[in-house]
Image: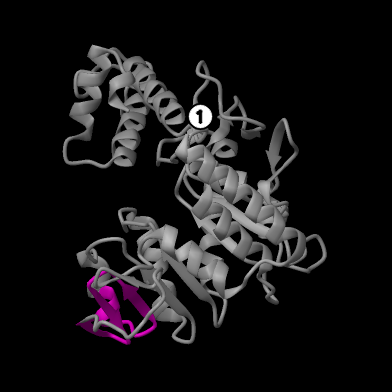
């Protein structure tokens, strides 16, 4: 991603990335731009205008790097097939901190109805009242519609003067994408999607007897971590299952050891019911569940296969999935 920045901007952003994540660096740039607005001062050798310009350049670089035309859609298609077959009293809600369009692409390819908080196709507006409405309630959406809540924005969200809109395609290079909210003093209307969706995340986890599965999240966002851990403690009859691709983050391990309904499954070990131990090799497990002496579901590709098998698609959905998977395999082999 840094390779697309010019020499001066690359050096400046490398300085911001020192001991910070990408999102922390973006947040700092926005604080600098807001703090110095209207002055000639500098922070980290950046003026307000230079910090804002670097923010825009980094966001454009992120959008370009998340082009999915060559991505392997197979795992996401299997996940979408499982989502299409879920049948619960309450809707399936997907919360993501990713900016890419893999989820939306897979759901649309299989014809799965979903709602992402915006209404419209070309320049969709955010509909707070629909996001906040309970499923099947007056003014709410039926439970069979999958919800996608992108907590940190998306490559097809665009900043406009008075609001954030969702476009029908990724934001063009000359415009900034609305990705990753910070505590900068944006106009209240521009902060609405992020504030409302984070509140939706909190309320969804506080619903009694909820099952929450977490995959691909490194627990690097303190605000989201706080909401997850608080919900696990307040709702002991709900289940929170975390699939770790590699080692268990220290903070997560500390919380899971004292929170029995927060279960953590990693490749070599797990924390279940507050007890931490290594896995024992099972007898003849499915390949996606166990391979090479390691638990496999921390890999999203295997998790998606496992979920699709637990609720197999049928009829037209199965035919469409088979066609798409064949096309995806052919594309990856090309």
Q: In what element is the residue under mark 1? A: strand
Give the image location of residue 175, x and y in percent.
53, 20
Residue occupying the point 31% across, 61% down: 245
Q: How many marks?
A: 1
Asked if residue 266 lies left or right of residue 182, the reply is: left
Asked if residue 98 lies left or right of residue 189, the reply is: left
Residue occupying the point 25% across, 68% down: 292
Residue occupying the point 32% across, 64% down: 244
Q: Quadrant of residue 132?
A: bottom right
- In the displayed structure, would residue 291 be above or below residue 61? below
Give the image location of residue 168, x and y in percent.
67, 32
Give the image location of residue 277, x and y in percent.
20, 83
Q: Does the magenta stretch include residue 270?
A: yes
Q: Nearer the viewer, residue 314 or 39?
A: 314
Neighbourhood count class around disc 1 (C-alpha, 10 Å): few under 14, some 14–19, many 20 upward: many
Give the image location of residue 203, x and y in percent.
55, 67
Q: Does the magenta stretch include residue 183?
A: no
Q: Which of 100 and 250 is in front in this view?
A: 100
Q: Quadrant of residue 125?
A: top right
- In the displayed structure, would residue 55 be above or below residue 84? above
- In the displayed structure, would residue 313 be above or below residue 255? above
Q: Which colour scheme is used?
A: one colour
Q: Is residue 123 visible?
A: yes
Q: Is residue 141 visible?
A: no
Residue occupying the point 70% across, 36% down: 124
The N terminus: image quadrant: top left
> To which residue does mark 1 refer?
177
What is the span of residues highlighted in magenta in the rendered image?
A: 255-277
Asked if residue 67 lies left or right of residue 131, the reply is: left
């Amino acid at each position: 991603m840094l390779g697309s920045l010019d020499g001066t901007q690359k050096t400046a952003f490398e300085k911001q990335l020192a001991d910070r994540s990408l999102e922390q660096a973006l947040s700092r740039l926005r604080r600098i731009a807001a703090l110095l607005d209207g002055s000639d001062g500098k922070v980290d050798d950046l003026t307000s205008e230079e910090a804002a310009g670097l923010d825009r350049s980094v966001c454009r670089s992120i959008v370009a790097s998340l082009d999915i035309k060559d991505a392997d859609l197979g795992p996401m298609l299997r996940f979408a097939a499982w989502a299409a077959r879920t049948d619960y009293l309450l809707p399936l809600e997907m919360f993501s901190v990713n900016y890419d369009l893999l989820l939306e692409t897979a759901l649309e390819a299989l014809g799965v109805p979903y709602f992402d908080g915006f209404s419209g196709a070309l320049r969709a507006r955010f509909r707070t009242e629909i996001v906040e409405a309970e499923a099947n309630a007056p003014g709410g959406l039926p439970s069979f519609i999958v919800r996608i809540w992108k907590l940190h924005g998306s490559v097809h969200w665009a900043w406009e003067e008075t609001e954030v809109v969702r476009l029908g395609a990724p934001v063009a290079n000359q415009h900034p994408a609305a990705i990753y909210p910070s505590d900068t003093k944006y106009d209240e209307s521009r902060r609405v999607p992020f504030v409302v969706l984070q509140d939706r995340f909190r309320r969804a986890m506080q619903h009694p007897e909820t099952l929450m599965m977490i995959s691909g999240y490194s627990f690097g966002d303190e605000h989201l971590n706080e909401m997850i851990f608080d919900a696990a403690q307040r709702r002991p009859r709900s289940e929170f299952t975390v699939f770790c691709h590699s080692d268990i983050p220290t903070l997560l391990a500390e919380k899971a050891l004292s929170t029995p309904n927060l279960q953590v499954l990693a490749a070599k070990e797990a924390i279940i019911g507050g007890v931490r131990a290594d896995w024992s090799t099972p007898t003849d497990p499915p390949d996606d569940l166990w391979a090479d002496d390691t638990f496999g579901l921390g890999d999203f590709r295997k998790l998606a296969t496992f979920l699709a098998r637990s609720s197999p698609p049928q009829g037209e959905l199965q035919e469409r999935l088979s066609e798409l998977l064949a096309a995806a395999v052919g594309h990856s082999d090309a």
